[in-house]
Image (cartoon, rainbow, N blue to C red):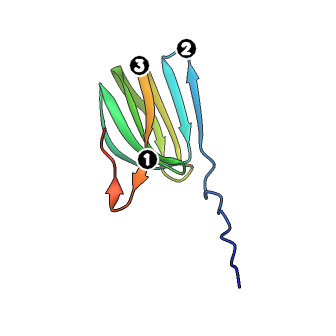
Amino acid sequence: MERKMERQEPLRPHRLVLEGREKLRVSGVEAVDCFDETGAVVCTAAGRLEVRGEGLKMLDLSKEGGELLLEGKVSALFYDEPRKGGWRRK
């Protein structure tokens, strides 16, 4: 008997909106692992997101709504891929 695995949708929808490389709005945020003026590591419904930049400021973080708003010069956005036994470091 074959069982089909159903893909479950995240509890919070994940979305990125980058306005002119100076304002980043992220939804589907579950936690912020670390943050400083040069970058952030954010756990989202779509995986672990790393943001790199200069002069970054956290303007808003809503734990209830899963929303994050950053301001500053954004130079890179990328997701870490999960691997067996944990997350891969780049």
Percent across and percent down for residue 79 are: 45, 39
Mark 1: which secondary structure? loop
The residue that disc 1 covers is: 81
Percent across and percent down for residue 85 are: 33, 62
Q: Residue at x 71, y 85 (%)?
A: 1
Q: The residue under label 1 is which amino acid type?
A: Glu
The residue that disc 2 covers is: 20
> Earlier along the polypeptide chain: callout 1 or callout 2?
2
User: Disc 3, disc 1: CB below 8 Å?
Assistant: no
Q: Label for residue 75?
A: 3
Compared to residue 9, the image places residue 70 above or below, namely above
Which part of the image, by quadrant, shows the C terminus?
A: top left
> Earlier along the polypeptide chain: callout 3 or callout 1?
3
Q: Label for residue 36?
A: none
Q: The residue under label 2 is which amino acid type?
A: Gly
Mark 2: which secondary structure? loop
In whole angstroms, how far apart are the C-alphas of marks 1 and 2? 27 Å
| Nearest the eye: 34 or 9 | 9
| Nearest the eye: 37 or 1 | 1
